[in-house]
Image: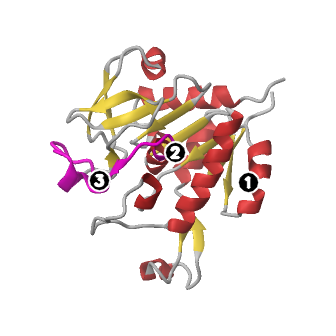
Amino acid sequence: MVLPLIGIPLDYLDTKDEPEAAWYSNYPWYATRYRYHDSLAKKGSVPCFIGYEHSLIPEYVSRFDGLIIAGGHFDHDPEMYGQHEFHKTLKRRSVRSQFEKALLEAFLKTRKPVLGICGGHQLINILYGGTLFQDLTSQFKDDIKHTETVPPTEPAHGLEVVGGTNLHNWFNQRSTQINSSHHQGIDQLGKRLVANAISEDGLVEGIEDPDHPFCLGVQWHPEYLLGPLDHIILEKFVQACHPTK
């Protein structure tokens, strides 16, 4: 069996903007956490990490069987969702945001499988015309702590899986526990998207496009394989990515 090839853009650190990144190199560098690779490899795929060469987007779209837009400790440009006042907590990485936006736009047109994790979940919502809370603590009731209060290898809060969605059909349960590490979240839901998971305080934690073969976004980090739902999400994604015979 030919294993599906999964494209995953790396994170990007520019030491001019983030001097603390110089512990590794005085020059800009790409990086990501190993769990993105290992969890997908365990589920029977070939993860492939890529940099931000816009001219290669047609090649990426042609060659990859699926795309993951991963998370990171940064925020997408508010201009991307029509906002021009910026909260003081914003930490932007525009080079990354603009590349991932262009890549995701091109990939969605092919109707190949797409999975957005954390910032990738937010980017899917943006591309569908939705908006974000720039800072949950000040803009959302935030009854639970969505920022990382415990390691992502431990549950942080409960989650309701919305009945009638693809996510619920896969999981067949209405509640579970997830990890959490984000200070932004979905405000207005994008057009054609459906909320498939809601946190205990009412924040949209999961989205899907019911008219797309596989377009899913989750605010938490399933690559840590914390519970059964995380395994199911990655397994269903990899299954959807298998190249046609």
Q: Which residue lies at the image location 40% right of the left edge and 59% below the top edge? A: 78
State the residue lying farthest toward the right: 245
Earlier along the polypeptide chain: callout 1 or callout 3? 1
Label 2, residues with CA under 10 Å away: few <14, some 14-19, many ≥20: some
Q: Is residue 45 magenta?
A: no
Q: Position of residue 244 (x, y in %)?
A: 80, 25
Q: Which residue lies at the image location 59% right of the left edge and 82% below the top edge? A: 27
Is 232 on the left or on the right of 245, as rendered?
A: left
Location of mark 3 (residue): 148
Q: Amino acid at mark 2?
A: Leu
The local secondary structure at tag 3 comes to: loop
Earlier along the polypeptide chain: callout 1 or callout 2? 1
Q: Which residue lies at the image location 40% right of the left edge and 31% below the top edge? A: 227
Q: Most prominent secondary structure in the magenta stretch?
A: loop
Location of mark 1 (residue): 57
Which mark, by number, is residue 127?
2
Q: How many marks?
A: 3
The local secondary structure at tag 2 comes to: helix
Mark in front: 1 vs 2: 2
